[in-house]
Amino acid sequence: MTIDTSRFSFAVLTMSDKGSRGEREDTSGPYLVQLFRKLGYTEKAYAVIPDKVEQIREKLIAWVDEDKVDLIITTGGTGVAPTDVTPEAMADVIEKEIPGMAEAMRAESLKKTPNAVLSRAMAGIRGRSLIINLPGSEKAARENIAVLVPSLAHALDKIQGGTSDCGVG
């Protein structure tokens, strides 16, 4: 069964203190926007905000609860630096965690770098929306999202009440 991705909206949120001040160009966010456009998803939003728990939490909740975005991809803030707070914000926002997605990303990244074990990225559901955290570097974001792309449309369909069998397609 092929799922029409154009029925799903997406948004990309980059967490970067320097990027939010215009001191660094965001390359991972624009890459992700282009990727999901190419995959046929409907773009709703793109933003760059500082690495601050409250701002991340507010943006994610607004995009889910008010704007009804189906898929939110975040980039940045998933490591172990003092300013990396995306997982803390996610823990406050999601209702269900999907550990397999984060595990798959880390497993694939571990083939390329031993530093993959430092990732604290999460994936989870709030309402009828899927939120996925990716690393901030464009290279790492590319590698991580590639692992998940084949299952995203099915995941979104199921999250929104689809009744197709998970063992098919």
Image: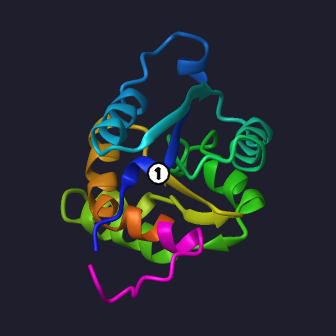
Residue under the image location 61 percent in, 46 percent down: 69
> Which quadrant of the rendered structure holds the N terminus?
bottom left
Name the main secondary structure of what is drawn in magenta: loop
| The C terminus: image quadrant | bottom left
- Residue at point 77% right, 49% down? 65
Magenta residues, start to end: 157-169
The answer to whether residue 125 is left or right of residue 137 is right
Q: Give the side of residue 80 with respect to residue 141, left or right.
A: right
| SS label for mark 1 | helix
Image position, residue 32 (x, y; %): 37, 37
Residue 98 lies, in percent from the top left, at 54, 74
Q: Quadrant of residue 66?
A: top right
Q: Is residue 43 above or below residue 6?
A: above
Q: Height in image: 136 above or below 145? A: above
Residue nearer the viewer, 78 or 122: 122
Q: Nearer the viewer, residue 142 or 169?
A: 169
147 sits left or right of 132 in the view: left
The 10 Å Cα crowd at callout 1, few under 14, some 14 to 19, many 20 or more, is: few
Q: Circle 1 sits on which residue?
A: 7
Residue 164 point in image, percent of width and height: 42, 82
Mark 1 residue type: Arg
